[in-house]
Amino acid sequence: MVKLMNVMKRYLKIIILGWMLCTVQNLVAQSTTIDTTGDLFKDFRTELMWEANVKIGNTIVVGESKRGIRRIIPITGGTFSGSKIKGDVLPLGEDWQLVRPDGDTELYARYLLKTHDGHLIQVINRALIHTGAKGNDFYCKSVLDLEAPVDSPYDYLNHAVFMGTIRFPVLQPGEDPYVIIGVYRVM
């Protein structure tokens, strides 16, 4: 019985060693395909899907937290339009913001779009706003998660990665506050 156990232990060690060697060989083979020229992302392209004029309400300042200053901006409506899609921004969302101790602002917006033909699309938009010390290195980009009905003409939105831009227009007297969100599909 002891002899059988020793044989089984040796056999198990050989199997584990063989598995480890195969794994290391796979890792080495993968590492040789790493692009060190910096050209890996040169072929990224984007396609503008739509621009949205998103109306916003008054800022609610939650206050100082352990992570920074929290505030909430209600989303009160708006419109969106692109070459393949258009409709309304429903007044059913909010932009939760965190002004970090380093001065950058993280945005987490969640809202709904209603297409001109009646389909609802959920939008989750995470953004980062950075303004440098001199104000000349402004950065504001976002990553969007879109969720469209699978039985709709907009199911293609469920199968791509989207990035966004946020612009803050100069408001005219009497104009309701809004932001302009550009939504781009990464090709």
Image: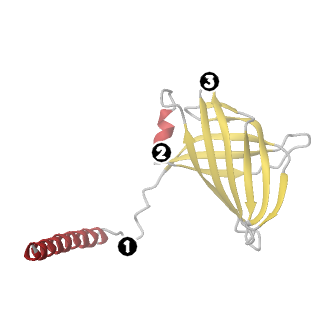
Q: Is residue 179 above or below residue 26?
A: above
Between tags 3 and 1, which lies in front?
3
Q: How crowded is the residue under tag 1: few (<14 C-alpha within 10 Å), some, or many (20+)?
A: few
Q: Residue at x 73, y 72 (%)?
A: 102
Q: Amino acid at mark 2?
A: Ala
* Circle on res. 118: 3
Give the Cα distance between marks 3 and 1.
48 Å
Is 118 situated left or right of 171 in this image? left
Q: Secondary structure at mark 2?
A: loop
Q: Residue at x 74, y 45 (%)?
A: 94
* Circle on res. 36: 1
> Cβ–Cβ below 8 Å for labels 3 and 1?
no
Q: Secondary structure at mark 1?
A: loop
Q: How crowded is the residue under tag 3: few (<14 C-alpha within 10 Å), some, or many (20+)?
A: few
Quarter of the image where one finds residue 15: bottom left
In primary-sequence order, the first of circles 3 and 1 is 1
Q: Amino acid at mark 1?
A: Thr
Is 184 situated left or right of 88 in this image? left
Between tags 2 and 1, which lies in front?
2
Image spot of residue 80 (x, y percent): 67, 35
* Circle on res. 160: 2
Of 99 and 171, nearer the camera is: 99
Q: Secondary structure at mark 3?
A: loop
Quarter of the image where one finds residue 29: bottom left
Give the Cα distance between marks 3 and 2.
22 Å
* Circle on res. 81: none
In primary-sequence order, the first of circles 3 and 2 is 3
Image spot of residue 101 (x, y percent): 75, 71
Image spot of residue 81 (x, y percent): 64, 34
Q: Amino acid at mark 3?
A: Gly
